[in-house]
Amino acid sequence: MAAIHPERWLKPTPQGLFCIPGDFYIDPSQPVSRAIVTHGHGDHARAGHNTVLATTETAAIMKTRYGEKFAHQVMAQPYGITVKVGDVAVRLLPAGHILGSAQIVLEYGGARAIVSGDYKRRRDPTCPAFEPMSCDVFVTEATFGLPVFRHPDDGHEIERLLHSLSIHPERCHLIGVYALGKCQRLISRLRECGYDRPLYLHGALVALTQLYRSLGVDPGPFATIAGMVPSQLKGQIVLCPPSAITDRWSRRAGDVLPAMASGWMQIRARARQRGAELPLVISDHADWDELMQTFVDVAAPEIWVTHGQEDALIHALTTKGYIARALSLLGRDEEEV
Ligand SMILES: [Zn+2]
Ligand SMILES: [Zn+2]
């Protein structure tokens, strides 16, 4: 019997991608009865669903962000185990994006579709690497879906930061990072590169960094800057949410050298807009080459694009002989990249 094509059972809706035979949404933007959540970023993981299926780590992140009662029922599931949800076999595979991030593998009617959420292919010490699996339809994001986006090696960016510290020992290096994922990855990479001094965190970054530690990602010594005076922060690294770089809070750190770690830092105008004197191109999303490599690795004849630079990516895919379509899902933003 011929397989039932995923377009007949996996539909974009205003609430998100809906799987008909499983009666669940993936990363719904509004409260629903059954949700499967790819990872803990706010544009994918929302509070108020009746049932949530997610990795153990994503469930823990949602609990930290939204409180104990973020959903009526939580089904925390390790990677690689297959469960039946309605008539659909569901499995979570590592996506390499942030701790707990998962691709959702769906099998129904003899066909396999994979919804990858957000992902990257580079090594990240805070989470297991993206695991490619062959499928009939691969659902991808396209945040950096333009050939101009090529991210440098993150080790190179860490070296630039450490070099800046060595030539500006009197300035506090204030680095804007997203609270979930980027913060802990930057800390882990600094530790791997031998930076063993205490790191200072804005209060908004502490809870998730502690959670990462409890889940096995050791940040080494860190403290908040509460009660410290500018002279104590000379030559130190302070991490804060991106918006704090330019707000009143940053005055507590004295003479600061503002920096920001994001895939968007490749664009000078974005770096200027953020007030980043030292833009660090460190991305948790796939760049152009990683996207293209992934489509080869998953060997899917058909690619559906959720959000980002859909038009450019779909054009390139069509030229290469793929079937490609835009899902135009609502409620995804460019945050936390
Ligand atoms: Zn994300
Ligand atoms: Zn996202």
Image: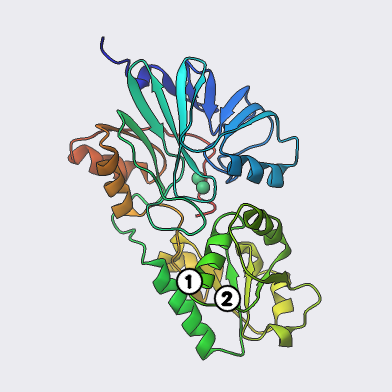
Q: Quadrant of the N terminus?
A: top left
The label on residue 146 is none
Q: What's the residue at 51%, 35% (across, down)?
A: 330
Q: Residue furthest top?
A: 1
In-front residue for pair 202/211? 211
Q: Are marks 1 and 2 in contact (CB under 8 Å)?
A: no
Q: Amino acid at mark 1?
A: Pro
Other-residue count near label 1 (Cα within 10 Å), few / some / many at <14 / 14–19 / ≥20: many
In-front residue for pair 46/209? 209
Q: What's the residue at 67%, 36% (across, down)?
A: 47
The answer to whether mark 2 is within 8 Å of ligand 1 is no
Other-residue count near label 2 (Cα within 10 Å), few / some / many at <14 / 14–19 / ≥20: many
Q: Residue 336's x, y, as percent?
A: 54, 53
Q: Secondary structure at mark 2?
A: strand
In-front residue for pair 142/70? 70
Q: Amino acid at mark 2?
A: Pro
* Residue 134 higher or lower than 127, as above or below: above
Q: CA distance from mark 1 to mark 2?
A: 9 Å
Q: Residue 204's x, y, as percent?
A: 70, 59
* Residue 170 higher or lower than 269, as above or below: below
Residue designated by label 2: 258
* Residue 101 higher or lower than 149, as above or below: above
Kindly tell me whether residue 275 is visible in this rendering: yes
The answer to whether mark 1 is within 8 Å of ligand 1 is no
Quadrant hosting residue 317: top left
The label on residue 279 is 1
Describe residue 208's horizontal placement relative to residue 327 as left or right. Answer: right
Q: Secondary structure at mark 1?
A: strand
Give whichever of discs 1 and 2 has the lower sequence position. Answer: 2
Q: Residue 185's x, y, as percent?
A: 53, 61
